[in-house]
Amino acid sequence: MAVCLIEIPQDSPGFNQFIGSWAHLGKTNFIVDVGPANTATRLIDRLESLGIDRLDNIFLTHIHIDHAGGLADVLERYPMARVICHEKAIPFLTDPSRLWTGSLSVLGKTAILYGMPKPVEEKWFIPHSRCNIPGLTIVETPGHAVHHLSFSYDGKLFAGEAAGNYLALDNETYLRPATPPRFFLAAYLESLERLLALENQSLCYGHFGEAPHSHEMLDRFHAQLHRWKEIILEELTKGEENPIPGCMKTLLENDPEIKLFKKLSPSMQHREKFFLSNSINGYFELLRERQSFGS
Ligand SMILES: [Zn+2]
């Protein structure tokens, strides 16, 4: 049995150590997420170079286009694979037009970089509620996305973005909320509780890499979501016309989990600034809607 992270290179500076697919190889072969449409052939090439000619399953943590966009191409190469995803997400994959419109509005040019997903026929899917794979635990983890799932198998927790975004560099870690609009804070926190109720195991992030102790990382992320809420609320009381730069500055100065930002390469910093802004924006929208924010 082996679990490995396959990095899927993207054609944009700074998008390294960011997009990938987890592969579990052994008695059962599965991958978790497939990356964007535009780079599906890179994932397929890599799977082939690992000698994989059979995929039993593809697990999708969620259907954002950087996780599920390449699905049609991967299924064309591995037609024996069955796709496990949230039952309510399936219509967005059989007809991805709404998914694409939403991606363009949240991600702009980055959506173009990832590419437009092709439709996938319904016959490939097994709704998560009807999936029964021995040894696999599926946990509903809404928050980052409404139809988000996490998968625990063989001592590994594949958490997509339910545990935030992660990077390890020079024995230090970087942890950032993945909270673009619309995100659901109360649901996010409840999802963390559900993951904390599982045994302590290795945590495999959607972006990017593996941390050995899920409980420690989930606790840290839980605290960070609250910290961001407090800092952003405080910043908003200043009444700036555009509060994002102030929020970002204060977060970078006061959130120890993103201290490593200073050591990232300039192009990775550029990438992270885009996603930090998006995550701050998610908090703004939450505030505007007055939903879940008291939690
Ligand atoms: Zn996502």
Image (cartoon, rainbow, N blue to C red):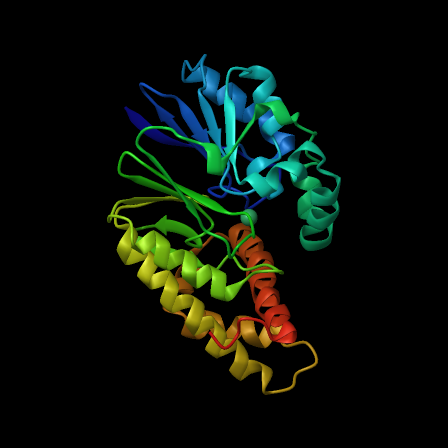
* Residue 203 appears anywhere in the view: yes
Front-lying residue, 66 or 42: 66
Front-lying residue, 169 or 52: 52
Left or right of 88? Residue 143 is: left
The answer to which quarter of the image holds residue 263 is: bottom left
Give the residue at x 44% y 16%: 49
Front-lying residue, 239 or 58: 58
Q: Give the percent coordinates (x, y) of residue 148.
A: 51, 47
Give the residue at x 66% y 46%: 110
Left or right of 171? Residue 20 is: right
Left or right of 141? Residue 243 is: right
Left or right of 214? Residue 44 is: right
Residue with the most extreme bottom position: 238
Q: Give the percent coordinates (x, y) of residue 196.
A: 31, 55
Front-lying residue, 231 or 190: 190
Q: Give the percent coordinates (x, y) of residue 151.
A: 39, 40
Q: Give the percent coordinates (x, y) of residue 282.
A: 59, 64
Q: How many marks?
A: 0
The answer to which quarter of the image holds residue 71 is: top right
Quarter of the image with the N terminus in it:
top left
* Residue 171 appears anywhere in the view: no
Position above or below: 79 against 236: above
Give the residue at x 65% y 86%: 239
Position above or below: 291 against 23: below
